[in-house]
Image (cartoon, grey):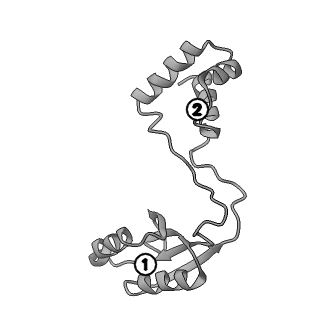
Amino acid sequence: MDKLDKKILTLLTQNARMPVKDIAKQVSLTSPAVSSRIRRMEQQGIIGGYTVRLELPGSAHQVSALISVSIQPAQRDEFLAMLQNEPQVVQCFHVTGSHSFIAKAGCGSMQELEHLITRFQQLGPTSTQIILSTPVDRRLPAL
């Protein structure tokens, strides 16, 4: 991957729907050359897909939080199964440190968040941080 590939990836991470001709202008290549590079990066697995990031005004996720939970190894499968039935859990990370998992949750109310935390506490101790804002939102590693 060279400098031009990195610049193309940076542009695509900012706007995955950016027209190839606009990318080509910004990287000083022809549209077919940019298309070829994008296709090659897709085939190599560097570009794993394209997605939509929803930011709906008035969405159901009024409260966002990070819930750290300590799970005993014997309860891991039960916890992971529980997560599959909790639509408020938008991401879950298996981590090192004092907790086993950190779940990112988007809830419609504080009561909904409290209910989710209570369910997690049935399997182990928790620690919760309410997300006030997101001053940096890099979904991909810096290139």
Mark 1 neighbour class, 10 Å CA radius: few under 14, some 14 to 19, many 20 or more: many
Coordinates of residue 127 in the picture (x, y in percent):
54, 80
Question: 86 or 48, which is in the foreground?
Answer: 86
Question: 26 or 94, which is in the foreground?
Answer: 26
Coordinates of residue 38 in the picture (x, y in percent):
51, 25
Q: Residue furthest front?
A: 58
Coordinates of residue 66 in the picture (x, y in percent):
56, 71
Mark 2 neighbour class, 10 Å CA radius: few under 14, some 14 to 19, many 20 or more: some
Q: Mark 2 highlights which residue?
A: 9
Coordinates of residue 131 in the picture (x, y in percent):
65, 70
Question: 67 or 83, which is in the foreground?
Answer: 83
**Above or below, comparing residue 49 to residue 122 in the picture:** above
Query: Is disc 1 placed on a helix, strand or loop?
Result: loop
Q: Residue at x 54, y 80 (%)?
A: 113
Query: Is disc 2 placed on a helix, strand or loop?
Result: helix
Q: Residue at x 52, y 25 (%)?
A: 1
**Above or below, comparing residue 12 to residue 135 in the picture:** above
Q: Seen in the image, is 141 located left or right of residue 39?
A: right
Residue 34: which quarter of the image? Answer: top right
The image's mark for residue 70 is 1
Q: Residue at x 41, y 72 (%)?
A: 86
**Quadrant occupied by the C terminus:** top right
**Which residue type carries mark 1?**
Ser
Determine contact: label 2, label 1, CB under 8 Å: no
**Which residue type carries mark 2?**
Leu
